Each structure stands twice: as structure tokens, then as C-alpha cells.
Image (cartoon, rainbow, N blue to C red):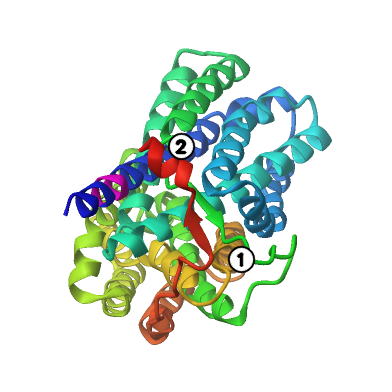
């Protein structure tokens, strides 16, 4: 009985620790995003050049993500996460140091590569804790990422308001987040590959199951990226809303996503991932229909809220399903993450391209169609949990330390 209690306490500690890691990861993103205008001014790049540069984090992440599995295999999950997360938090200082476009692209590539590898490592550990606890926690973990992003954004907004140099701001933020991240990593599960397990390939294409699950994540992230980047523009240009109301729609959408993720685990435990994603797809589709037919800003904002509510838990559940879909969780998670990163990259530009040819209303008609894809394809998240003990086992030394 005492052993069961100790194991439960260890898992609870690991859950809180990996949640803190997600929060730190999100805080780096929020800290960077608020200082992009300063970076643009400092490097002297045009809006078009900035758009090109901002594609490089996703490129770096997509290429580096498949490496996370081999790193975890070689060094163990905790050590790998500790190193990769520290590289990511320290990489925050890089973009603000760039003197020109070429350097900015190169530094953003490195920034994105460290982001992607740490993303895969922390999601793999999150899924492992979820499997051992036999309850959903991934939605809450991604909710903690959103909380971290809001905290980082708030601090960055304050720094920008005070006119602080982004190099100094990011140096201080990187130092603090690195310390917090290293402390958080102390509590995560210390998992190592079984002695007889072959090392995974350093780089490999994701399994087919991950591609199907990634397609569901693609639909959700496309809707998320389109809503975050274009909701304010939609309300201003299509519905003639004031700048304040237009800006509020974006904030409301982000808050809806964060709250839904923090509350999502209880819903998933009760109704199951497939049913939750299917019903979420219905909400997102209804939200999209409200957006494209709304005669006023209030109804459109309601539509964006429905959209955020419907897609909030899809990506966490896609990561969890990917990890249970085959023999190599890290590789499957990397595949899904690559697809979702790509979706986040192409969504804003795709919405703009369609709007240039037709209108923003038609663009969000496309978003609505993809949201309906969640209803049609939710069944691919119905996977059977894979045995984990034969792949990753706690080291005896770590158990004694706990």
C-alpha cells in the first residue's frame, strides 16, 4: 500500500513538473512575439522580409524535431529535456542580436530548431505520465503552455511600453526562464531506454498513423492560426468594428483556448477523445458559420469563441494519440508536431492569399470547412495504448532519490 502511495506521489510530482516545463516553453514564445516590432526596426527589414524571416522558426523546428527521439534514447528523457529546454530558453536572446535579414533568418532557424526538439521531448514525457496515471492530462499541459505564453506576452508588453531594449529584456528573460526550466526538470520522470532496445534512427519519416493523426491536428491548428492572426482584421474590414473591439476579439479567442484546455481533461476522461473532438468539431463548424454570416461584431466574436472552444483540445489529444499509435512515441509525436507546425506556418498566408483573390468571408469559409474535418476524421484518434515499460524504464537511482 505504501509503495502505491509513493508511486502516486511521484506521478503527481512529475505531472506538476512537466506542466511547469510547458509553462516555461510557452513563456519563451510569448516573450519573443511581443518584441517582433523592435526586432524588425533594429534589423531594418521590410514587412515582406520580416514575413520571410518568420518562416524560419517553423522550418528549423520541422527539420530538428525527428532528432529528439535519438537524443532522448542516448541521454535519457530527463537529461535530454533538461538540455533541450535550456537550449530553447537561451535561444530567446538570438533574434534580437541579428543586425540584418540574413543573420535574422539563420538565428530564427536555430531558435525554431531548439523549440521543436524541446517540444517533442516535453510532449513525450507528458504522454508517459498520462499513460501511467491512466487519466487525461495533455489538455491541461497545453493549457499551461497557453498560460506561459500569456505571462511572457504580458512581460514583453510591459518591457515594450517602458521602451526597454529587447536585447536586455530577452537576456534577463532567458536567464530567469532557464533557471525555472532547470528546476522544473528535476521533477519529471527519469526514463531511459531498455538495455536491449535498439537506438532509433537519427532521422526518419513519421509513421503513417502519425500522418493521419497529424491531419486532424492540421485542421485545428489552421483554424487557430487563422483566427489568431485574422480575427481582428475580419472584424475591422468586414464588419467595420472599432480597433478596440477588433483587438478584443483576438484576446478573447486566446483566453477561450487557454481556459478550455485547462478544463479539457475532465471532459476527455468522461467522454473520450474521439467524442470530444467530434463534438468540438461541431462547435468549431458552428462558430465558422456564425463568423461568415454574422451581420455584426458581437455575433462574429461569438463565432470566434465557439471556434476556440471547439479546437482547443484537439492538438493535445493528437499528441497523445500519436504516442499510443506505434512503437516509437517520440517519432510519432515529432511527425504530428511537424504537420501542426506546418499548418501554423501556412494558415495566415493562405488566408491572406484567398482573401486577395476573393474575400475574407470566403477565407473563413475555408476555415469552416477544415473545422468540419474534425467531425469527419475524429475517429483516427481512437488508438490502443502501447506498453511503455519495454521502451522506457525509470532508472533505479532516480527512484531512490525520490
All told, the count of numbered labels is: 2
Side of 44 relative to 122 (left or right): right
Residue found at x 43% / y 63%:
315
Q: Examine the rendering and report whether any part of residue 361 can be seen.
A: no
In this rendering, is residue 262 above or below 206? above
Q: Nearer the viewer, residue 24 or 52?
A: 24
Q: Nearer the viewer, residue 128 or 262?
A: 128
The residue at which mark 2 appears reads as 185
Side of 37 relative to 388 (left or right): right
Q: Earlier in the sequence, mark 1 or mark 2?
A: 2
- Residue 375 screen position, x and y as percent: 35, 82
Query: Magenta includes 215?
Result: no
Side of 205 relative to 223 (left or right): right
Q: Secondary structure at mark 1?
A: helix
Rendering quarter of residue 379: bottom left
Rendering quarter of residue 32: top right
**10 Å crowding of disc 1: few (<14), some (14-19), many (20+):** many
Side of 74 relative to 210 (left or right): right
Check the image and name the residue furthest to the right: 102
- Residue 39 screen position, x and y as percent: 65, 28
**10 Å crowding of disc 2: few (<14), some (14-19), many (20+):** many
**What span is in magenta?**
8-12
In this rendering, is residue 351 above or below 94? below
In this rendering, is residue 18 above or below 107? below
- Residue 211 screen position, x and y as percent: 58, 77
Q: Nearer the viewer, residue 72 or 7?
A: 7
**Which corner quadrant holds the C terminus?**
top left
Residue found at x 51% / y 22%:
173
Rendering quarter of residue 112: top right
In this rendering, is residue 17 above or below 90? below
Residue found at x 60% / y 41%:
84
The residue at which mark 1 appears reads as 331
Amino acid at each position: 500500500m505504501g509503495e502505491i502511495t509513493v508511486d502516486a506521489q511521484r506521478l503527481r510530482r512529475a505531472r506538476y513538473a512537466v506542466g511547469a516545463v510547458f509553462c516555461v516553453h510557452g513563456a519563451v514564445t510569448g516573450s519573443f512575439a511581443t518584441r517582433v516590432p523592435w526586432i524588425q526596426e533594429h534589423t531594418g527589414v521590410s514587412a515582406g522580409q520580416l514575413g520571410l524571416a518568420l518562416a524560419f522558426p517553423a522550418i528549423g523546428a520541422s527539420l530538428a524535431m525527428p532528432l529528439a527521439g535519438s537524443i532522448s534514447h542516448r541521454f535519457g528523457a530527463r537529461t535530454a529535456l533538461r538540455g533541450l529546454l535550456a537550449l530553447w530558453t537561451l535561444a530567446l536572446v538570438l533574434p534580437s542580436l541579428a543586425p540584418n535579414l540574413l543573420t535574422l533568418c539563420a538565428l530564427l532557424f536555430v531558435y525554431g530548431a531548439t523549440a521543436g526538439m524541446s517540444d517533442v521531448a516535453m510532449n513525450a514525457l507528458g504522454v508517459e505520465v498520462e499513460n501511467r496515471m491512466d487519466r487525461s492530462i495533455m489538455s491541461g499541459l497545453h493549457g499551461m503552455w497557453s498560460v506561459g505564453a500569456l505571462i511572457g506576452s504580458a512581460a514583453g508588453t510591459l518591457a515594450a511600453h517602458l521602451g526597454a531594449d529587447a536585447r536586455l529584456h530577452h537576456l534577463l528573460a532567458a536567464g530567469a526562464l532557464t533557471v525555472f526550466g532547470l528546476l522544473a526538470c528535476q521533477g519529471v520522470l527519469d526514463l531511459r531506454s531498455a538495455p536491449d532496445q535498439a537506438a532509433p534512427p537519427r532521422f526518419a519519416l513519421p509513421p503513417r498513423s502519425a500522418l493521419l493523426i497529424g491531419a486532424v491536428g492540421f485542421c485545428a491548428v489552421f483554424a487557430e492560426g487563422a483566427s489568431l492572426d485574422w480575427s481582428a482584421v475580419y472584424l475591422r474590414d468586414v464588419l467595420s468594428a472599432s480597433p478596440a473591439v477588433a483587438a478584443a476579439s483576438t484576446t478573447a479567442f486566446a483566453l477561450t483556448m487557454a481556459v478550455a484546455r485547462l478544463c479539457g481533461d475532465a471532459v476527455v476522461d468522461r467522454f473520450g477523445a474521439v467524442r470530444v473532438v467530434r463534438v468540438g468539431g461541431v462547435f468549431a463548424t458552428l462558430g465558422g458559420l456564425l463568423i461568415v454570416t454574422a451581420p455584426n461584431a458581437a455575433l462574429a466574436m461569438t463565432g470566434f469563441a465557439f471556434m476556440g472552444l471547439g479546437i482547443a483540445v484537439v492538438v493535445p489529444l493528437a499528441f497523445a494519440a500519436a504516442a499510443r499509435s506505434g512503437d516509437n512515441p517520440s517519432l510519432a509525436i515529432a511527425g504530428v508536431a511537424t504537420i501542426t507546425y506546418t499548418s501554423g506556418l501556412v494558415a495566415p498566408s493562405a488566408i491572406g492569399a484567398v482573401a486577395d483573390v476573393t474575400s475574407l468571408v470566403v477565407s473563413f469559409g475555408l476555415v469552416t470547412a477544415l473545422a468540419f474535418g474534425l467531425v469527419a476524421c475524429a475517429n483516427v484518434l481512437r488508438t490502443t495504448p502501447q506498453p511503455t515499460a519495454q521502451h522506457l524504464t525509470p532508472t533505479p537511482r532516480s527512484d531512490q532519490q525520490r
